[in-house]
Amino acid sequence: MQVQIESPAPKQRIKAHWKHVTDDLELFFENTALPIGMVRLSRWETIEDVPSMVEHHLDVIRASYCTRDFVAYVQRLQKLKMYLINNH
């Protein structure tokens, strides 16, 4: 007799994925010296106050966890993270 173990429901897997992603971002920004002054991520994206932007985006992510708006804030922080890794 074989016992089948059910996998978590799709919503639970998605939430677990985003929890991992957001925990990783929080840990990175807590342990990274943030630049003072302006950072230009692309031709159209300039951050004037990096510490404030990070704090604000993390607050939004915590408040709107797994909503449609949530993804844009996560993506912006991921882009900033890659910029900081590649340029510092």
Image (cartoon, rainbow, N blue to C red):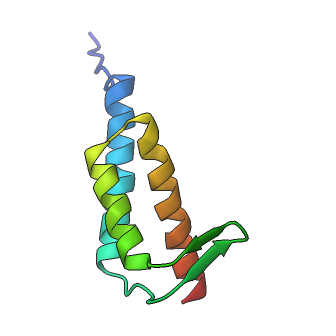
Q: How many marks?
A: 0
Front residue of 84/59: it is 59
Front residue of 86/37: it is 37
Front residue of 86/68: it is 68
Q: Is residue 59 left or right of residue 45?
A: left
Residue 7 appears at what percent x and percent y?
33, 25
Q: Is residue 15 left or right of residue 74?
A: left
Say whether residue 24 is visible: no
**Residue projecting furthest to the right:** 43
Q: Is residue 34 left or right of residue 76?
A: left
Front residue of 75/13: it is 75
Say whether residue 2 is visible: yes
Split into 4 quadrants, where in the image is the N terminus?
top left
Residue displayed at 49% across by 71% down:
81
Using the image, determine if residue 17 lies above or below residue 79: above
Residue 72 appears at what percent x and percent y?
50, 49
**Residue projecting furthest to the top:** 1
Using the image, determine if residue 48 lies above or below residue 78: below
Split into 4 quadrants, where in the image is the C terminus?
bottom right
Residue 71 appears at what percent x and percent y?
47, 45
Residue displayed at 38% across by 45% down:
18
Using the image, determine if residue 17 lies above or below residue 68: below
